[in-house]
Image (cartoon, rainbow, N blue to C red):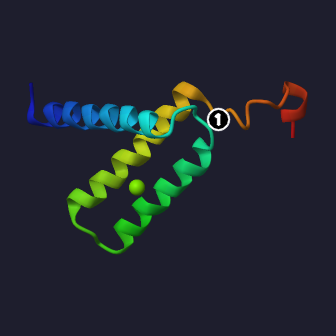
Amino acid sequence: MTKTKFAEVVTLQAISAETMRARLKFPGGKHLLAAATEELGELAKALLQKKPKDEIEKEAIQVAAMMVRIIEEGCPEYDSLTAEESKP
Ligand SMILES: [Mg+2]
């Protein structure tokens, strides 16, 4: 395995672990869009404040975990619209 591929595997494992941690802490999938937006804001703040690399990675992993949850669980509070209601 190349060094780059190994790093990718480690990152994906960290995202998976964070996704599981988040599901245990906040089960049910409510407010995922708000939580994802909050996490993205924390990542942006860490980047703009030039925080240490490990802190930026931690925030990026939290953002990625929220994206995984939205992909897998959807956003229940927005899923209640019918196809007709969803039309612009
Ligand atoms: Mg965060």
In the displayed structure, does residue 4 sit left or right of residue 44? left
Count all numbered tags in the image, as a single digit.
1
Badge 1: few (under 14), some or many (20 or more) residues near its Cα, within 10 Å?
some
Residue at point 9%, 24% (across, down): 1
In the displayed structure, does residue 75 sit left or right of residue 65? right
Disc 1 residue type? Answer: Cys
Using the image, determine if residue 33 lies above or below residue 38. above
Pick the front one: 81 or 1: 81
Pick the front one: 13 or 27: 27
Residue beneath label 1, please? 75
In the displayed structure, does residue 27 sit left or right of residue 78? left
- Expressed as whole percent of the image width and height from the top left, the position of residue 31 reads 62, 44
Residue at point 14%, 32% (across, down): 6
- Expressed as whole percent of the image width and height from the top left, the position of residue 17 reads 30, 33
Residue at point 48%, 55% (across, down): 40
- Expressed as whole percent of the image width and height from the top left, the position of residue 32 reads 58, 42
Pick the quarter of the image with the C terminus: top right
Instruction: Name the image quarter holding residue 53.
Output: bottom left
